[in-house]
Amino acid sequence: MQFSINSKDPAPLHSQVEVLLRKLIAAPKYQQGKLLPPEAQMAAELGISRNTVRAAISRLVQEGLLERKAGVGTRVLKHAVATKLADWASFTGEMLQKGIRVQTFSLEVAMIPADDEVFLSLGIERHKKGERLLRMARVRGYDDIPAVYSVSWFHPRTGLAVDDDFSTPLYELIRRKSALVAQISREEIRAGLADTTLATRLDCKAGLPILERRRVAEDGGSRQLEFNLNYYRSDRFTYSITIERNHA
């Protein structure tokens, strides 16, 4: 593949190189054990420093995707680390497991001003008020009744754009756009009541108990991809947790 850096991309150079490397190592020849091009060669082709290329490779080595041996080179590991989200299902996935077909009642995607909480949650330094980030808001449910109002804010490193097809599975879309894989979910769950605005979106009475679920999705290198807020109608959704006791 042809390497190239986008000078207009706000993502750091090492992050851009990492995205390129993830696409490169997916090629069959590298999956079969062929050594990656030398760091110096990649740096020259991209017009950047060798240290920047090395930093990107080091990140993938830490994730267990690559192995680097002095005097030999860098190659893809045959057994990559397993995802930390093996049991993390989307709302659609959770419903499908119960045999329920999910309906989307509304879907809005736009670049809009984000507040300090969003920037902080995504680990982005805010330079000025009114700074915009990509946001997706949607209402989903089943049996013609809304169940959850979801708002997601995305880090620019995901490569997502307003005109992308957000009807496809979100994390698959992120993987295709940026080669980044969501592996970690940091969540907070709290109880609340539906205010007038939320009651309108969820077609319920104001004051109905609501389950609020906040999530920051990260890749295997603990880099933020998505800040997600979900508001579930308590009469339409139950959040269950299974805890196994360690008897040692």
Image: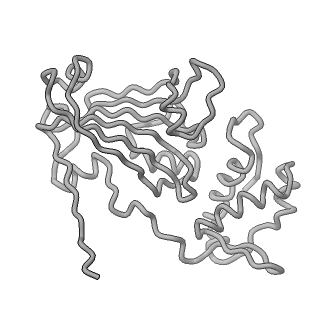
- Applied colour scheme: one colour
Does 85 sit above or below residue 79? above
Give the residue at x 37% y 48%. 187
Where does the C terminus fall, quadrant-wise? bottom left
Relative to residue 58, is residue 100 drawn left or right? left
Rendering quarter of residue 209: top left
Does 55 sit above or below residue 11? below
Whether residue 103 can be seen here = no
Residue 67 on image: x %, y %: 67, 74
Relative to residue 167, is residue 181 drawn left or right? right
Does 147 sit above or below residue 46? above
Relative to residue 19, is residue 84 drawn left or right? left
**Looking at the image, which is closer to me, 136 or 246?**
246
Where does the N terminus fall, quadrant-wise? bottom right
Give the residue at x 56% y 43%. 158
Whether residue 97 can be seen here = yes
Residue 6 on image: x %, y %: 74, 39
Give the residue at x 53% y 49%. 176
Residue 159 on image: x %, y %: 58, 40
Residue 228 on image: x %, y %: 40, 39
**Looking at the image, which is closer to me, 125 or 166?**
125
Give the residue at x 52% y 24%. 111
